[in-house]
Amino acid sequence: MRNVFAGVAIVSATVGAYAGDLVMHYDRPARYFEEALVIGNGKLGATVYGGIEDDRLSLNDITLWTGMPEKGSENDLSGNVGKVRRLLDAEDYAGAENANKSLQGHYSENYQPLGNLRISYGTSGHGAAGGFYRGLDISEAVATTRSQVEDGTAYTREYLASSPDSVIAIRVTASGNRPLEFSLGFDSQLPHEVSWRKGSEMVIDGYAAAHSYPVYYGAVPDSLKHEYDEDRGIRFRTIVGVDAPQSRIAMSDGRLTVKGGLEATILISNETSFNGFDKDPVRSGKDYKAIAGRNIDNAAAKSFEEIRSAHVSDYKRLFGRVSLDLGETDRRIREMPTDMQLRLYTDSLQSNPELEALYFQFGRYLLISSSRTPGVPANLQGLWNEKLLPPWSCNYTTNINLEENYWPAENTNLPELHMPLLDFIGNLATNGRDTARKFYGVERGWCLGHNSDIWAMTNPVGLGAGDPMWASWNMGGAWLASHIWEHYAYTLDRDFLARYYPYLKGAAEFCIDWLVEKDGVLTTSPGTSPENRFLLPDGHPVATSYGTTSDNAMIRQCLMDAGAAAKTLGVDSGFIAEADSVLRRLAPYRIGKKGSLQEWWHDWEESEPAHRHQSHLYGLYPGNHIRRDSMPEIADACHRTLELRGPDATGWSTGWRVNLYSRLGDGEMAYTIYRRLLKYISPDEYVGDDAVRGGGTYPNLLDAHSPFQIDGNFGGTAGVAEMLVQSTMTDIYLLPALPAQWRDGSVAGLRARGGFTVGIDWKNGAVVSATIGSEKGGCTKLHFNGTSVDIELKPGETRRINALPR
């Protein structure tokens, strides 16, 4: 890596300098996606490159996917289950591995890029730009680019994605000796046509493929992986308009040109015909053309300041609920561009508490920006994708990644943003009933395989050739359904629980009926431990077995949550008794010869001892039935497992490990792994000495798997909250995993189970004071500084507790 101080420059005060703890700032335009800044309103998003002479906004709509509604499996494959089980009973794991492929269906569809808005400014030939600034203020969700030309004219561009007005808005201003001069053009990798509307608006109509294959499916060449059909697939309309007082606006060669004046506002509207997971987007689609036009017309009737004000107010209503102070960073460091701060933080282990707090809040920013569309949760890249064949289809990967996206929704006080996922679970439950019957022969309930998409696909993937270590897995429903109880635990919303309880119960019923008896206990067969394999005595690696620990852990949590929900609602006494009976007979956890938690029924050697997945630790986190106080030996075995896995992993796995160490009360290791999550990773296209690969964080603070996956951002944000506050329905623990590096600080607005909101001030590692409030009232026990206090609050009451000096 080149010297971290090489090329570092303090930004000129004439175009904007360091502006606070929650501003990402850079001294040059972005060349690559991993340097660009992302904005989004939960549906429509942009990746902003912020160039000087040429600017680019890469656009996305979270509802723009290939494919059509699911038809379910045409064949009943459930008869193959018996063959796999017989092979496993005979301990023929290699045979079972091959037979397991007979329980595979089609792949998910691909999330698609919308297109690029390209802006060319008339600054070429007017002298080199100087004093360049590019930034994103995540406290307001506004990105800014400033630059100067030789004659002193300063150009400023502000970018925002408004939820209230359903548009992306850009304000371009000039101050100095030269008026504005720029042109706009649009391009897309999807089939599209350009026309004009109202004399000064560019209209783009296009459509996505009716079917596609993933980039990694080798049986089909990349050139044939999208099947386009003018009569099938999701349609879209994009409208780009300009309001430029005192300017001349012209249209020619598919571009809008603006000359003269000192200020212009660019508005971008988009809508697709997607109208639900089960509706044909052509025959029963939205009136997307009318919606796109209505949105831009309504926004165009307002000034940019009105749009900006409404946007900031709406955004702060969510973002402003939580504040975090972990200490001050040296001024010389925080004035460096954010990417340089990240490199210094990585290479020198330099303290930078403001960067650590910024990363925490950036995760909350990303969730607000990518999860506000009913029934369409944030995907593998949140909202931002530039490729027709994105990594892993940019889909919903359900053996960790989709769930990790929503770990910070409840504890960082963004419960509304959990709802797109919770609604999506209902869609999955509908399609998953067919999968349960036709693939597994289970008549009750529903299940979900390794992948899904906007059409709520639930079948196991692979087309008969996928590696079972990832393709042949059916616990996605059990994992996801527990989000229903989690949302209730934080909100105490009984109406919500009553509506969504059938989905939780259905996932639990599938689990009950999928279990088999072995050696006097209940377990699964076949099963896999996601994406990991064990070694047979001859050294051959396989994934298919019976009694995998992760299966049993997810089933245990799902049954516990479904039973708790039924008891809370006072319904289904028969189901409660059935679930309790199964829980008593479920296979117990085992500790292996190395002192770690056993991942499989037998104490096999792993093919990859430092594997990125740690699914067998699910019961510790995100599950909550492995606890240090009630299961100390199992908790210690979890800790040993993490030690053996080692500190290096992909971004999302590192984020998971922050939470696991936090649950174990090991604040020092949680912090060490958090720092590891913030390891500088170069953009993917960097080469030579500048190329830094692996899991960590890109210059724009997006998570590096690598390549980009957003789940690590969300896992890291949840992990910081978990270090500061942990809770059950009866207890709240303050600073349970506080590292020495955060000896002084404060946090406000975190949420705890039982419907509580918590704030803490601490000094020298001990709580000085705390606030606890509750909208609905309730009782809890507050644990801090080695003592406990019983708290009872009335509805709407907030109480402050001052700690006695230790």
Image: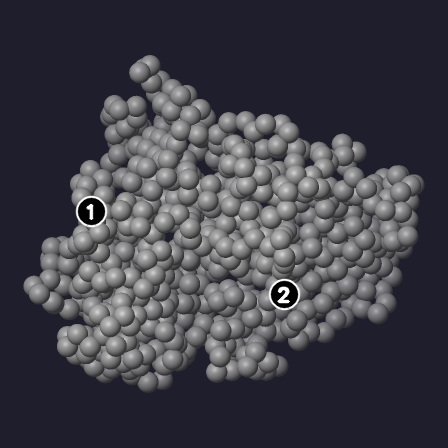
At horizontal 48% and vertical 60% (from top left) the residue drawn is 380
The front one of 201 and 466 is 466
Q: Of label 2 and label 1, which has the lower sequence position?
A: 2
Q: Position of residue 734 (x, y in %)?
A: 33, 30
| Amino acid identity at mark 1 | Ile
Residue extending furthest toward the bottom: 75
Q: Quadrant of the C terminus?
A: top left
Q: Say if 420 sits above or below 456 in the image.
A: above
Question: Does 117 sit left or right of 552 as displayed?
Answer: right
Q: Position of residue 559 (x, y in %)?
A: 21, 56
Question: Does 515 sit left or right of 775 as displayed?
Answer: left
Q: Residues within 10 Å of mark 1 (few under 14, many from 20)?
A: many
Q: Position of residue 666 (x, y in %)?
A: 32, 37
**Would you identify the image quadrant in which residue 771 lies?**
top left
Q: How is the image coloured?
A: one colour
Badge number at residue 634: 1
At horizontal 21% and vertical 81% (from top left) the residue drawn is 83
| Amino acid identity at mark 2 | Leu
The front one of 353 and 350 is 350
At horizontal 22% and vertical 70% (from top left) the residue drawn is 537
Badge number at residue 537: none
Q: Nearer the viewer, mark 2 or mark 1?
A: 1
Per the image, the residue denoted by label 2 is: 114
Can residue 517 be seen by looking at this rendering?
A: yes
